[in-house]
Amino acid sequence: MNKIDTHPIYIEPFHVDFTGRVFLGVLGNHLLNAAGNHSQKRGWGIGALNETRHTWVLSRLSIEMMEMPRNYQHCQIRTWVESVMKLFTNRNFAVEDADGRPLGYARSVWAMIDLETRRPCDLLTLYDGDILNYVVSEEENVCPIEGHGRFRFRDAQLVRTIGTYYSDVDINGHINSIKYIEHILDLFTREQMERGIRRFEIAYKAESYMGDTLSFYLQPVSDTEADVEVRKNSTPDTPGEVVCQAKVRFN
């Protein structure tokens, strides 16, 4: 079986923002669907894993776009596994137009957890290490964007606190990873969004659940860049546990 899959997508009017460019959350969902389809074909999909009480969770995601897909555009996403370590696997993506012209790329890091203990599993031994059969090295297929960076928060300011509800929760029972992206982008102005997003990075640190309160702390870095930290169930006496951290870089 080919180690690289191509997942066709079509950008419909309800997928785009007021600029006519696809919402980053919608693009993120397409990336995750491509990853899920790739895994499912090779026996590593959520349906098969749930039978043995395992599932995938997203740990890091970095998306860098030269050009965002637009309304009514046919595109495709190529995806492949770049490397596998004991507790994490690196998966890459290329977003292309219908002719194969690159529009952008993404890098992601995934862990597999035990649904009972919520602890990470050893990917090198689970199912006899079968996942190693699908690795495509960087030399075989290049993903030319930077790897995941580190976050340093020194003077982030609380800018918004929201509740979490039914529509925020995914099949794993926690707040959906893409929902965090949507909530984070809601912090920025129309003018910033009109410029378009060049790069978005997010690191997931802990799970949150329906009914948790999320607090968003914003730290401007420059005119085109800002960092965001999300904490859950903060009180006046404690900032709460960090759920995720993100960096947004505008054009």
Image (spheres, rainbow, N blue to C red):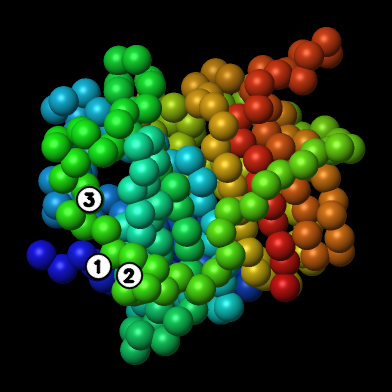
Local packing at callout 1 (Cα closer than 10 Å; few below 14, some 14-19, many 20+) is some
Residue identified by numbered label 1? 4
Q: Position of residue 57 (x, y in %)?
A: 39, 37
> Is residue 113 left or right of 152 when viewed as pictured?
left
Q: Amino acid at mark 2?
A: Arg
Q: Earlier in the sequence, mark 2 or mark 3?
A: 2
Q: Amino acid at mark 1?
A: Ile
Q: Secondary structure at mark 3?
A: helix
Rendered position, 74 above or below 241? below
Q: Secondary structure at mark 1?
A: loop
Q: Amino acid at mark 3?
A: Leu
Q: Residue at 51% across / 73% down in the picture?
A: 144
> Which quadrant is the N terminus positioned in?
bottom left
Disc 2 vs disc 1: Cβ atoms closer than 8 Å? Answer: yes
Q: Residue at 32% across / 57% down in the picture?
A: 81
Q: Which mark is residue 206?
A: none
Q: Position of residue 131 (x, y in %)?
A: 21, 47
Q: Residue at 54% across / 27% down in the picture?
A: 206
Q: Position of residue 128 (x, y in %)?
A: 14, 37
- Which is nearer the eye, 166 or 119? 119
- Which is nearer the eye, 149 or 205? 149
The answer to whether residue 32 of the structure is visible from this angle is no
Residue identified by numbered label 3? 132
Q: Quadrant of residue 63?
A: bottom right
Rendered position, 86 above or below 70? above
Q: Which mark is residue 78?
A: 2
Give the CA distance from mark 2 to mark 1: 7 Å
Give the CA distance from mark 2 to mark 3: 19 Å
Q: Secondary structure at mark 2?
A: strand
Q: Earlier in the sequence, mark 2 or mark 1?
A: 1
